[in-house]
Image: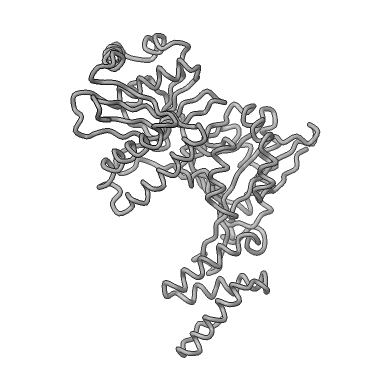
Amino acid sequence: MYTVEIIDTPEELAVLAPHWDAVFEADPEAEFFLSREWIAQCLAVIGSNWRVLAVRSLRDAGQYCAFLPLRVDAYLSKTHQEFCNELLMPGLLNWADFTGFLCRPGDEQGALQALAGQLQSMPWARLVMKNLLVTPARLDAFLAAFDDSAFEVQRRPRGLNRDGIDNDACPGVALPGTFDGFLAERLSPNTRQKLRRLLRTVDRGGEWRVTESDRASGARDIEVLLGFWQRAWAEHKGEDIGRLTRYYRSILKNAFDADLMYIPMLWRGEQPVGVLGHFVDRRKGTLLFKVAGRDPDCNDISPGLVLHAWSIRYAIREGFRSYEFLRGNEAYKYSFGATDRRLVNLVIRTRSLRNAAEGLDPRGLGEVVEQCLRYQQKGQPEKAEVGYRQILRQDPSQPVATFLLASLERQRRMSGSDISD
């Protein structure tokens, strides 16, 4: 027997911390992007529009056994011309490469069915689950609990992007106990020889050397990394490059400050020529490569090969069990002996295309007000009025919707236009 609690305040989430950590450590499928530290950062960015579904096992003295974090959003349905709620995976706001469930072994069937049952009683029309790294058994247990007459499951494989990269592929390398073992067991003779030669070059510490970021150098090294990344992607990302760089800076800085990053930098003399940024998951013994930057004018050595070899050697020395290249099947990853895991992307929709439970999510009404105000500012008052009236039918005392609807009605009277109910 299982029960589900809905956690929706930072105070309640803080109480869950030891329970979250215990389930995370026990779950063999748990990944860095479901760690309490990562999810807490994501929920802080979201503000109040989040929920955590927490499952307790009544046969085990009410111990927590599963968690599903969710972000709550709203959108205007084109079909029904009314606002509906949407649930999403919150980790993606911080560019998580993997999402999924946390679940204690032995509780998968009952706990995931309980999660699905709780979801079906909540107000949403669309549940978007991207980048799920989940075993078929877990996913089947979760999906089988949805009522087919009321809900539709759509699987949406991402396919190749415009650069021909499959971002549903997640290459990773299981690490042996020694670096010599890695070279002998995972690599081709040519690659093994090349990496040995490159590492000897930087180990000598002459013209070429590698440093590892510490508290004194971390901020500088992140800026070097982002500078290289921005140069490489500026044309590709266009006008978004400044915003994306600022967001990357926030993610990397927060992770570094929390001691969750490993950043090796390759130098030629006093000039940095390459940097890698990794997330560090000490609980699961995983080093996760997230972002790279290199000097495009450095052509007499491969910064990427040097730094990945250096990082894998570091990971093995520190006792890590795997080296993850995260999403994307770029060819160079397989030269290190990587094998793929596959992500699942799916959308669960109500067949009515309306919220499963009556009304909008009560704690998400402020988000609907903000969307309506944006419609109003863009010269689409009829869409704004739909939302204001929908909110006031549910909460007649909502002050902001009351004021903004009144202002729309005054504008209509003054202009003589008709956007009536």
Quadrant of the image containing the N terminus: top right
Decide if residue 94 is on the left or right side of residue 361.
left
Image coordinates for residue 321, horizontal then vertical, percent = 50, 19
Decide if residue 131 is on the left or right side of residue 291.
right
414 or 334: which is nearer to us?
Answer: 414
Tell me which residue sits at (36%, 32%) in the image: 329
Q: Residue furthest front?
A: 216
In this rendering, the answer to whether 288 lies above or below 380 is above
Tell me which residue sits at (35%, 20%) in the image: 309
In this rendering, the answer to whether 393 lies above or below 238 is below
Task: State the image quarter where residue 271 is shown.
Answer: top left
Decide if residue 128 is on the left or right side of residue 191.
right
Image coordinates for residue 84, horizontal then vertical, percent = 57, 62
Tell me which residue sits at (46%, 33%) in the image: 342
206 or 216: which is nearer to us?
Answer: 216
Task: State the image quarter where residue 197 is shown.
Answer: top left
In this rendering, the answer to whether 151 lies above or below 416 is above
42 or 1: which is nearer to us?
Answer: 42
Image coordinates for residue 76, horizontal then vertical, percent = 51, 65
397 or 116: which is nearer to us?
Answer: 397
Quadrant of the image containing the C terminus: bottom right
